Image: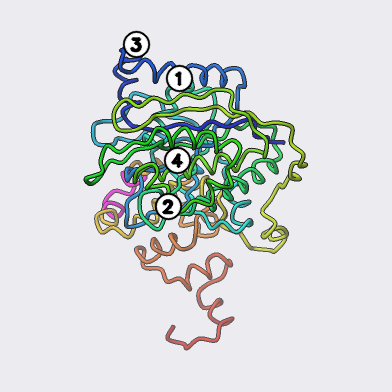
Amino acid sequence: MARIIGGIGTSHVPTIGLAYDRKRQDDPAWAPLFEGYKPVARWLAEKQPDVLLFFYNDHANSFFFDCYPTFALGISPDFDMADEGAGRRPLPGIKGHPALAAHVAESLVNDEFDIAVFQERALDHGCNSPLGLMWPHEPGWPGAILPLAINVLQYPLPTAARCYKLGQAVRRAVESFPADLKVVVVGTGGLSHQIHGERTGFNNVEWDEQFLDMIVDQPHKLAALRHAELVELGGAESAEVIMWLAMRGALNDEIRCVHKNHYLATTTNMAVAIYEQGADRQAPAAPVHVNPQVAGMEKIPGTYPFDLRASVHAVRLNRFFWRHREPAFRELVARDLEAAFDELQLSSEERDLVRRRDWLGLVRYGVSFFVLEKFARVVKMSNLAVYAAMRGETLEEFLKTRRVPESA
């Protein structure tokens, strides 16, 4: 059974990654910061977690404000590093854990956290800035990442209390996953800083020290703070410490801080801390193998629920059909179908399903009907004709089972 073995709180300032890439670890101005991460790297090397579950925020690099989710869980088999305007960082891509991600997503939704999920979106400095300092990554990373993005950019933000409860729900989800995995939860952001307006450059190191003490012994008091109080104490952008509270909620009641470092170099008091858990008086959650809301659905003949496992399996094929919304892509499909296949990197099996217009086979493979129907429109086939094909009937035979006008 999966278990959470500890937690890490860390800043995610982009200049950390920039200084790392420029090999400034021994520069006098940066050495105190990098020295603070060495115990974290040693601790992770000793504990050897399989997965780092990151509570982080995206800084308008993979998400934009036209559709910016409050909570979003990455479910891809792998993740790339984002180009934030100055080129992609020289870090390898990192594996995800789709099975754990699907389980956590289902558990959270059933725990009444209505989260979004995402695939094939790059991870920005909210993840990769501290990640490179904590985990060796040449030639590759030693484990997988489970990224859970939290909106701390665009108000209304989730409350500190909601983030703490999210962490508790994540803990229940992880501990009910049946595979034997070691998971470390990571909360990112802060500490005190403000990077807009006339208050730019504000810091409050005394409050940062108090916060680091309270996250251990008084998390409920921190969770009761309003955003305005966090901003007054630590600066406008320091409200992102609510992501530390998500990490704290995923740990048990009694924790101890075994390492702590903070260093104010430019505009942000950059901090990192390791938290180990005491004896847990609560029994872990019983393993859950399937989403209880759909248990038994597999026994309903001819029914194929589009779940996260199907979505991950068929993401490129679903995107192929989804892109038929674009006139230029429709023109490419009509002119050179193989080139369209190549652009989406479809497998030979996927290409064959499309060529044969095997509607039922596509659904069984993991295609959502609501992107499939876009392709049907392009090939001049009505939804009714697709329904008939999936039933193995002619359109005329299918219409005889419907109460519709003859002209339909």
Residue that badge 1 annotates: 36
Q: Position of residue 234 (x, y in %)?
A: 38, 41
Relative to 58, is 83 above or below? above
Work out whether mark 1 precedes mark 2 in sequence or the reverse, and give the earlier one. 1
Tag 1: Cα neighbours inside 10 Å, few (<14), some, or many (≥20)? many
User: Where the C terminus falls, by quadrant?
Assistant: bottom left
Q: Residue 367 in the image: x percent, y percent?
A: 50, 55
Secondary structure at numbered mark 3: loop
Q: CA distance from mark 4 to mark 2?
A: 17 Å
CA gap, disc 3 to disc 2?
Answer: 37 Å
Q: Magenta span covers which residues?
A: 332-341
Label 2 crowd bin: few (<14), some (14–19), many (20+), radius 10 Å: many
Q: Nearer the viewer, mark 4 or mark 1?
A: 1
Residue at numbered disc 3: 26
**Location of residue 5 by image quarter:** top right
Label 4 environment density (alpha carbons within 10 Å; few <14, some 14–19, many ≥20): many
Of 283 and 277, which appears nearest the observer? 277
Please tell me which of labels 1 and 3 falls first in the chain.
3
Of the two numbered discs 3 and 4 in the rendering, the one whose residue sits closer to the viewer: 3
Mark 1, secondary structure of its residue: helix
On whether residue 196 falls in the magenta region, the answer is no
Asked if marks 4 and 2 touch (Cβ < 8 Å), the reply is no
